Every structure is written in C-alpha cells, then in structure tokens.
C-alpha cells in the first residue's frame, strides 16, 4: 500500500497514546506495522535524506493533534493524551482531518493567528483538502517553480546562437568542478571550421591530467539526435585519441542513439535538454537565487 498521508495517521496516533505516555519513535514503528508498510516504504526518505517520509508524517499528525489540544508534549520525543483527547476517543470519528480539528478552539486560534501573521486571509497550514504536510506542500511548490524555470532556461538556450550554447556548456562544466576557471572558457572552446567534430575540450581535473571532449548540438524541440551523430562523434574522439566524450543537446536522443553510446568502446555521456536545464539550475548557470527559505525543526538537545 502507499504511505498513509498525515491526516489518515492522526486518529491512529491519538489512539496510540490512549493508555499512557508514548515515545514518538515507538509510535512510528507501531503504526508502520499496523499499516503493513513494506521495508521499502518504511525506509523511503524525504528529499533532505535526514528523515523517513512515514516518520515525518507521523510527527506532523502528532503536531496537529497537539495544536488542537488532544495530545500534549511532555519530555524529549514523548507525548501523552489530554482529557480532551480521551473524551474524543469515547466516541471517535471514522477519521480525524484538518477540517474535523477546526471544532477545537485552540486549533482555530492557531489557524487564525497564522493567517494574521502572514498578512493574508489564508492560513499557513495546508488547505483542508490537502493530504500533504506543510513541508511537503513547500517541496511540491519548489519542484513546480524549478520545473517552470527549467522550461524557461531551455527556451532561452535554444533561442541563442550555436556559439552561445557551446560557451554555456563549457561554463556549466567549469561550474561543476571540471577544468580551470570561467576565465579559461575561450581556451576550452574549439567550435570553428576544421574542429574535427568537437566543440570544446576541457580538463577533467585541475592539473589537466585527462581531458573531456565536448560536442554541443543546439536543436529545436522534436529534432532528436540519432545514432549517426553519436557514431560521428565517436570517430572524432578517435582522431583526437580521446578516451571519453560528452554529447550535449537541447533536444533529446533517440533510443538507438542511447544504445549506440552504450555499445561503443569509448565512454560517451549523453545529456539531453531537460538534464542540461536541471544541471544549470543546480550549479546556478543562467539563474540565480532570488530568495532562501529555511525549514527548521525543534532542537531537542536545547530543552534537555
């Protein structure tokens, strides 16, 4: 089964604390077994790699119950049920949701307070219909922003000149740690008549002990790179006595092109337009940071 969302987990979390104080880690293990999660689902990590997705959702379920006054945090990583929580379990609903929690005054105050603090009429808590936790909402929005940015970057690269595209590829490689510095771009570029089918040559390491030969094809969307272009590049590498090459395009590669690159005796890495845009975003080539948002969590050590 899929990993349960945090609203599905709220009632089970409350029931887990019905008898006595519980440790959140024990509740995570208990509910993982109760929901029949596989080892893969239990181990699935958030993008940060610091916490499992299931544990994160259990923590958020506990947090929402706390905001409604149904559970109370006690000592480090522990909580227990409140009288209001016990009363609720005398005739429990089929499911506790964000909408259900709005009947509790403390929860409504927090929602209204969030809205006032943000200067908006909307609460900072997720929409009632959303099954995502607040940090999942932020990550989803971040993915959408980056996807839109990748499309914009790719359009701009495609609309530039071939020379601009070649320089962009080499600048990206330098930003990734290959070659020397940005001031060495012109030295790394070949890109002229008689270049032997190679658009750039860049050192793989700062000492120049090995080199990467680059082919950059600025194609429009739908104009795919086929196996013939890969074989031609392989021939160019042979003439330069090169062992490895990088083939970058603003379009995509056909299945036969990918298969050809895998079968040839020299190592040829293929980067299509979408991969190129994502790498440019990751290494801040053609884009820059506009705003930084920090996700912070409680420092349990501070309160020991």
Image (cartoon, helix red, strand yellow):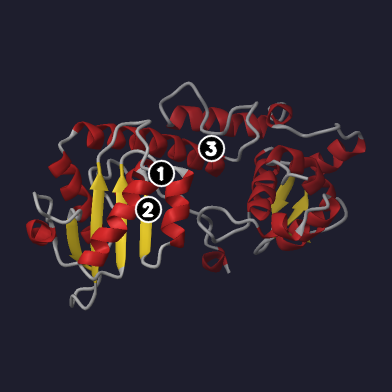
Category of crowding for the residue at label 3, using alpha-carbon neighbours closer than 10 angstroms: few (below 14), some (14–19), many (at least 20): some
**Counting residues from the N terminus, which is met first, the one under dot 3 or under dot 1?**
3
Q: Earlier in the sequence, mark 3 or mark 2?
A: 3
Kindly identify which residue carries mark 3: 137
297 with respect to 200 (left or right)? right
| Foreground residue among 59 and 35 | 35
Relative image position of residue 188 (x, y in whole percent): 13, 60
Of the residues under marks 1 and 2, which one precedes in the sequence?
A: 1
Say which residue label 1 marks: 253
Q: Position of residue 303 (x, y in %)?
A: 56, 65
Q: Position of residue 104 (x, y in %)?
A: 71, 30
Residue 240 visible from this viewpoint:
yes
> Which residue bears the numbered disc 2?
270
Q: Residue at x 63, y 52 (%)?
A: 53
Camera-side residue of 43 and 163? 163
Please determine whether, in this image, residue 122 is positioned above or below residue 95. above
């Amino acid at each position: 089964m899929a990993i349960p969302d945090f609203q599905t987990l709220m009632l089970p979390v409350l029931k887990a604390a019905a008898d006595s104080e519980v440790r959140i880690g024990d509740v995570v293990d208990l509910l993982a077994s109760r929901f029949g999660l596989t080892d893969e689902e239990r181990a699935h990590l958030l993008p940060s790699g610091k916490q499992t997705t299931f544990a994160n959702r259990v923590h958020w379920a506990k947090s929402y119950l706390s905001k409604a006054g149904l559970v109370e945090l006690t000592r480090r990583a522990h909580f227990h049920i409140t009288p209001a929580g016990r009363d609720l379990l005398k005739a429990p609903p089929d499911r506790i949701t964000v909408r259900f929690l709005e009947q509790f005054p403390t929860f409504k105050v927090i929602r209204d307070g969030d809205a006032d603090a943000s200067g908006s009429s909307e609460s900072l808590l997720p929409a009632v219909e959303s099954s995502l936790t607040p940090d999942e909402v932020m990550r989803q929005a971040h993915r959408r922003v980056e996807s839109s940015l990748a499309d914009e970057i790719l359009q701009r690269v495609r609309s530039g000149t071939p020379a601009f595209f070649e320089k962009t590829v080499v600048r990206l490689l330098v930003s990734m740690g290959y070659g020397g510095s940005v001031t060495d771009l012109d030295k790394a570029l070949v890109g002229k008549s008689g270049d032997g089918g190679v658009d750039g040559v860049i050192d793989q390491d700062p000492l120049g002990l090995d080199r990467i030969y680059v082919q950059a094809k600025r194609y429009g969307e739908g104009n795919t790179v086929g196996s013939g272009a890969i074989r031609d590049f392989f021939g160019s590498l042979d003439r330069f006595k090169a062992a490895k090459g990088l083939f970058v395009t603003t379009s995509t590669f056909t299945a036969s092109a990918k298969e050809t690159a895998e079968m040839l005796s020299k190592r040829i890495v293929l980067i299509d337009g979408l991969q190129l845009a994502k790498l440019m975003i990751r290494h801040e080539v053609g884009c820059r940071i506009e705003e930084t948002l920090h996700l912070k969590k409680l420092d349990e050590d501070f309160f020991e």
